[in-house]
Amino acid sequence: MATVVLAGGGTGGHVYPALAMGEALAARGHELRYYGDPRRLEGRVVPERGLPFTPIPSPQYPRGGVMGKLRFAWQLLGAIRVARRFLKQHEVDLVLGVGGYISAPPVLAAYTLGITRVVHESNVTPGLANKLCARFANLVMLAYSQTGPKLPGVAPRETVGCPVNPKVLDGDAAAAFERYGLDPSQPTLLIVGGSLGAQTLNDLGIAIAKASGRSHQLVLVTGPAYIEATTAALDPLPPGVCLVDYERKMPEAYAAADLVVCRAGSSTLAELTALGKPSLLIPSPNVTDNHQEGNARGLEEVGAAEVVVEKDIDFGAVAAHIAALLDDAERLQVMAAAARGEGKLDTAERVADLIEGRLR
């Protein structure tokens, strides 16, 4: 059996697909390690899963300035040296880079040592780290086929989708309603701004919670940095509203929801389609080449989701539209069926097959 390093992180869009792929490999007897930034999401989530976690220096590419780029190059070389030491110490057979700037040092270090490198890109538009790592990869795996021409290098491309942990299907709605203190017989809206939270989605949640005549319940996952301000804005908390800072049981939250309002990262959309959940998507504008809107429009085109562009958002109008959607059971059923038609649950197993093919 092989030793495989998962490298990358920073956000749930990188960390959770990596863990889903890792679980499929672990189930086949391979040893896993995770190289990442201890200050970011992976530094909290990965140790909770019981995976050995190795902290790697994480230089971030500067957007401008010659001196900044020279400093980055020097820091990257230092991070590669650290990663080389750990790769040799752990006798690693393959490095799987999943994006985020922390993925570059382990992938590039593996290249210098002749260790097999595989890259997975989960978005339509690739990030800077994967653009760099793809040049040195033995295999590039894509969530979307149209991403292939956007990546440099000559490594073979395989379109596999975005991995989803099958446990996302095991959510217990009854347990969620009990934990949230909500009524399972009432329509329920879930708003979640990703693992870190999103101010715009929280502001929308506040507007919905305060709306007069609201006939549906609301679960608002604020993100740890926003919980205090959101709690203060909704003091006293209106009936039928539950605030959560960070939801560690997302399958339960999904199971309780009739409609999900969220960003449009590839891993989130993969979960929504696997579950067949209707959604209203508000893509983050703060991402490379606006790739989240590209992700979201794909679901909109098949009727699985509606898209609201953040710069155009009118909280009152969107709140009213959401209320109308939750009152339209037939419309939600049509959206749910369209979402389910896009779902893929075998991605992690296919990834494991491809990786094992590279290990032979």
Image (spheres, rainbow, N blue to C red):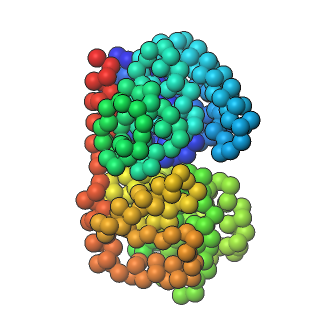
Which x, y percent locates residue 214?
52, 83
Q: Nearer the viewer, residue 194 or 175?
A: 194
Q: Quadrant of residue 227?
A: bottom right
Answer yes or no: is residue 176 visible. no
Which x, y percent locates residue 80?
59, 22
**Residue 185 versus residue 20 in the image, above or below:** below
Taking the spot 42% from the left edge, 83% from the top edge, the residue there is 324
- Tell me if 26 is positioned left or right of 79 in this view: left
Say which quadrant the N terminus sits in. Answer: top left
**Residue 18 versus residue 334 in the image, above or below:** above
Taking the spot 36% from the left edge, 67% from the top edge, the residue there is 300
Taking the spot 37% from the left edge, 26% from the top edge, the residue there is 138
Q: Nearer the viewer, residue 3 or 117?
A: 117
**Residue 359 versus residue 43 in the image, above or below:** above
- Tell me if 82 is positioned left or right of 120 in this view: right
**Residue 255 versus residue 188 in the image, above or below:** above
Q: Nearer the viewer, residue 58 or 25?
A: 58
Outermost residue toward the bottom in this view: 213
Which x, y percent locates residue 119?
42, 33
Answer yes or no: is residue 198 visible. yes
Taking the spot 50% from the left edge, 44% from the top edge, the residue there is 127
Q: Nearer the viewer, residue 159 or 200?
A: 159
Say which quadrant the C terminus sits in. Answer: top left
Q: Quadrant of residue 18?
A: top left
